Structures are given as structure tokens and as C-alpha cells.
Amino acid sequence: MPPGKRCRPAGCDFVAAFRASSHWLDSSFVLHPFVPMSLQSELQHRVASALRAAGIEESLAVVTTAADTRFGDYQTNAAMVAAKALKKNPREVAASILSHLKVEDLCKAPTVAGAGFINFTVLDTALSDAVNEVARDERLGVETVPKPKTIIIDFSSPNVAKPMHVGHIRSTILGDSLSRIARHLGHRVITDNHIGDWGTQFGKVIYGWKHFLDKDALEQAPIAELVRLYREVNALEETDPAIKETVRHELVKLQQGDVENLEIWKQAVALSWKEFERLYGLLGVSFDERLGESFYNDALGPLVERLLAEKIAVVSEGAVCIFFPGSPELEEKPCLIRKSDGGFLYATTDLATLEYREARWKPDAVWYVTGAPQQLHFEQVFASARRMGVTTDLRHIAFGSILGEDRKMMKTRSGENVELGGLLAEAIERALAVVAEKNPDLPKAGQEEVARIIGLGAVKYADLMQHRLTDYVFSWEKMLSFQGNTAPYLQNAYVRIRSIFRKATAEGISTESAPVTISDPAERALALQFLQFGEILHTVLEDQRPNLLCLYLYELADRFHRFYEACPILKSEGSVRSSRLALAGVTAEVLKTGLSLLGIGVPERM
RNA sequence: GCACCCGUAGCUCAGGGGAUAGAGCAGGGGAUUUCUAAUCCCUUGGUCGGAGGUUCGAAUCCUCCCGGGUGCGCCA
């Protein structure tokens, strides 16, 4: 199985889904999530009022952060958009809007620039007020959605009897992060690990188990032994068609409930789970449910029979298929749900799984976090589900493949791909070396704890920071880098702040929350950045793109590091000191919360 | 053959109608009596694969072409 793929079928027009993604929830939170305290949304309201007064369509009132700080803090392109429809000069339209715009309590006088941009520079006082609002808010300006949805997120889904390798990291980490964000925004989330515990790999495993199982090796390193069996049988099959047939027969026997094969299967599943649990524990990933493929076995036959009876499925060339007349994309691509030999397919399991989920949780949405190559499969499954009357929003959260140095997908069978356990161990080991060097006084146990947080953070961040649809070339160097745009960079910003607070406490300086007063440019830049926190999370969830959160946090840490260089905190005095301390404190909170939503922890020192 | 994705700096990637296209790494030069240098500052580096089109405005949308990848009835 290629690593970019899951053990499960795929398919669905993920591009269409991606494009439509901002429409599946309430339109009310699509464009501008309700952030009543936010300066940005307040400006937007003011612009909307001005547009109304100027006789222009209010929905054009979109305020964004300025493209360049030279132009100010925020901007709106409404005049240029309106000018197009009105067939007027954009700058004249902008002037007309300005004449109706009342923002003197928030900004310096707005200016018209370029082709018709209206730029806003926020007053230091207004910015200070806004920051103090966020600082007082437990949720740091992040509102929950008014109408929470029930979302089932199906991710990770490794195959039993095979090791988890780097190809599994994307689904696992992406799914985990999306789950955390969705929950944080108030949705009801059910995470399910639809593990591949009933695939055709068992024919090979059982054959190998019966013919050349090394019991000592199984004792020592169970997964490795199972993999060895799998690979050896795989190789044998290539050369001997008779063995291939026997292997297939072992699978059929298992599916028919053969006692011996069932027992081997149970042991293999249990051994695999043990290893998966170890990795999930290390990664801090948990699931509400682990209903693997085998859970749905008994449902497959009746499901197919019912679909046949309902004339949704038909027999074609001996196989049971669902056709999609009237759908140009799927006209020639039926969904097969029973082979001519009576065996079931992944689509069958997916449909049975969906029925179960519908009945048990009545979800508003089901998200399948699997590789992009599976899009057609999901398209077929979703189309089948619709024929069955399912109206739930089904979405394939596709992601690109991890490529080898040769820019081709890493192949499981070639054996060259990197096992996840080894990658994580290496990351932690390298982090430990750095921690020991930088923080030799820390007790060993403390160093190990810090190394774990940093090493795992680096690996997770390296994956999450990438646009999820892009293929990327796997590189140890990138995965294990602790410099530049990496998790340790973000963690370091947090650690610096914690260090300042420790020192303040030691010196008897009050760290009680105090009002923030913005004056220095570095303070402005930092403050404006964490005011965006409330908006960014909604955008991330709407597009299912944690890389935007990574980018946001990187910029926050970047601005903090500059502030740190430019604005001494403990060296300053009085209200300036307490203000800067408070500013740093909020930054730390946003960093910690933001990273936790990526599934990344923060150490107190590093 | 058909469908989908991708092509942006030496490398790895952001940006997906808006102002002079950004970052990390790599390369060059600086900063530490000062809250952690896993940091900061400066700097080198780009006909955004190509050609048309739409638009006041295109890396971004449309069409075609080139190049790479992936998928496409009894695998998962």
C-alpha cells in the first residue's frame, strides 16, 4: 500500500468540496466570524454603514488586515469592487464612502490610496482597549459557533500487521488538529479510527504465520515479524501463482469464520494495536471510537441485498454495482460493492460504516481524512450514499502525498520508507542532545520531557505547516530542524516569556494582569497580530487548513521576538513594565492555545 | 485514452482577484557587560512552466500547450 494512501478506499471531488467548503456551515460565520470585540469587525460594521449611506451594496464591506504596514493596519477594497458594478471611478467611490465613514474614535483619518484602497491606521488608544479586551477574555477573543454541529472525523486508520510509517503521519496529525479546533469552536466532534483490520493483507499474514512464523521474533518485535511475514509472502506470490491462490484461500477461510485463521487474526490485531497505542500515546492523539473494518462485517451482506432489492444496486458482469446515471463525471465509473466471487469491497464497508454512524450519531457532517489519490473512490461512495438517501455533508479532507528524494510516492513494499516510530524517536533524541547542551543544569528527567515536547512538536509542525493538498518531499533535515519556521521557534517564544515571568516573580515584580498601553511600533505589530486569533481559527476550520494556523503562530512568534529585542520588559519601569509584561503574557497564552490546537505542547523551559 | 492535482528564489514551500510576489534553509555580513543567541538586524537570490483571454487590476480566474504526479469495474 503506498503511504500516501490509507488502507481505505478513496474518491470524491475534493476540489469541488474544497471550493464549496465555505458554504456547508452557517453563512453567518463564513466570512466574518462574530467577533464583537474585534477591531476588525467593528471597522467592518462602520464601513457597512457608510456603504449603506452612500447607496452601495453593504455586503461589499470587507475589511482585511493591510497588505503592507506602510499603508496602515487595516484596509478595505470595497470602493474598487463597487466601482466596477457602478461603472464609476474607484477613487471617487472611495471618496464618497469616506464622506459617510465615522471612525474617528478608532482610527486616524482614513486615506484613499492606489487604485482606490481605503486604509485605516488604528489609534494607539483604541488598540490598547482592544488588547485589554482580549487579555480579559478567557477564550482570547475566540467565539464559539452559535449553532454547533455534530462532526464525525475519521482519520489515521492504519492497517493492522503493518507498521505506521511517515505516510500515516499526515492523516493522524491533520485529523487530530482539526478535531481539536472544531471542539474548541464549540462543535460536537466524534473521532473514529477506522482501522484496517480486515483487509486482504490477512491472507498473506495467515499464510506466513502458518508456514514460517518465527515465534521468538514475534515475541521480541511483533510488528516487525508480521511485516516480515507479509513481505516474504508478497515476494513469493510474485513468483508463484499457486501460492497466490493459497493466500487468497486463507483470506476466504478467515472471512468464513475458520477457527484457526480467526485466532491468528485476533492475535495479529491485538499485537498491532499495542504498537499503535504506543505511538498514539507518544503523539498525544486519542480517539472516541476505534471501530475498524471488521466491526462492520456482518452488515455487508444484508446491505448489498437491500440495495439490490431497492434497485439502487444492480448486477453487472457478475458483480454488484451502483451506477450513477445523469452524473457525467461518474457515468462510466460505477461503485462496486460485491465482487463476482461474492467478496465485498472497501466501498461496501464504507457504506455500512456510514449507515452505522448515521443511525448512532445523526451527524451533520462526516470528514474523511485520507490521501488525495483516493478522491475518486470517495466520490463514488458519497454518490452512492446520496442514492441511499443520506443527506449528511460528507467531505473528503484530502491531502497530498509524501514523496521520496526521487519525487515519487514512497512505496510501502520497497521498504525504503521511514517508520513513524523511528522518526519520532530520532526527533526526540536530537532534541535531547540540544536540550542537554543548552540546559545542562536541568535534571535528566526534565531534559527528556522537554526533548519529547520539542522533538514531537518539530515533526508535527513540519507536516502541518504545509498546505494539505500539496505533495511534499520528505526530508529528515526539515522534519528535525529546530531553527527558523519550526515548532521550537514558536516554543522558544513561549519559553522566553515564561522565563521573564519567573524572573519577575523572583525579583518581587508583580505579574498581576495590568492594563496594556501601546506605544512602540513593535508593540503595535504584536498587538495587531494577536487580535487576529479570534478570526483565524474559524478560517482554519472552514477550509480544514491548519497550515494557516501555523503561519499565524509563526508570525506571532516572529513579532514577539522583535518586540523582545526592541522593548525591554523587566528593565523598564512602572506602567510601561506592567503593560509590556501583560502584552507578553497574552502572547504566551495565544501561543500555548494555538499550539495545543495543532496538538503541539509547550515546555516551561528549553 | 479519460479525469484530477501540481509547476513560484539554488533547495523546501507560503501566497489562490488587489498595492513593490513572501518565508525557512543554504550563501555573505553584523549584534551578546543587557529579560534564554533554538534569537535579532542587514544582504545575495525570481521573465510566478509557456502562450492567449477576462478585468481598472492576474502568480491567483478561463482556454490551449509543455512538463511532472495520481487515479480510472471485480486491490486496498
Image (cartoon, coloured by chain):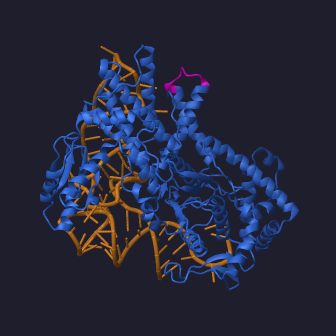
Chain colours: A blue, B orange
- Residues A268 and A603: in front is A603
Magenta stretch bounds: A437-444
- Residue A264 lies, in percent from the top left, at 82, 57
Outermost residue toward the right? A259
- Residue A573 lies, in percent from the top left, at 30, 17
Using residue B24 as the reference point, say whether residue A114 is left or right of it: left
Q: Is residue A510 visible?
A: yes
Q: Report the predominant secondary structure element of the magenta stretch.
A: loop
Q: Residue at x 60, y 45 (%)?
A: A285
Residue A502 magenta: no
- Residues A284 and A426: in front is A284
Up/down of A602 relative to B3, above or below: above
Q: Please tell me in which quadrant of the rendered image residue A518 appears.
A: top left
- Residue A522 lies, in percent from the top left, at 28, 33
Q: Residue at x 58, y 67 (%)?
A: A10
The N terminus of chain A sits in image quarter: bottom right
Residue A442 magenta: yes
Q: Residue at x 44, y 37 (%)?
A: A591
Q: Residue at x 64, y 42 (%)?
A: A281
Tally of numbered tags: 0
- Residues A85 and A466: in front is A85
Q: Please tell me in which quadrant of the rendered image residue A383 appears.
A: bottom right
- Residue A496 lies, in percent from the top left, at 42, 28
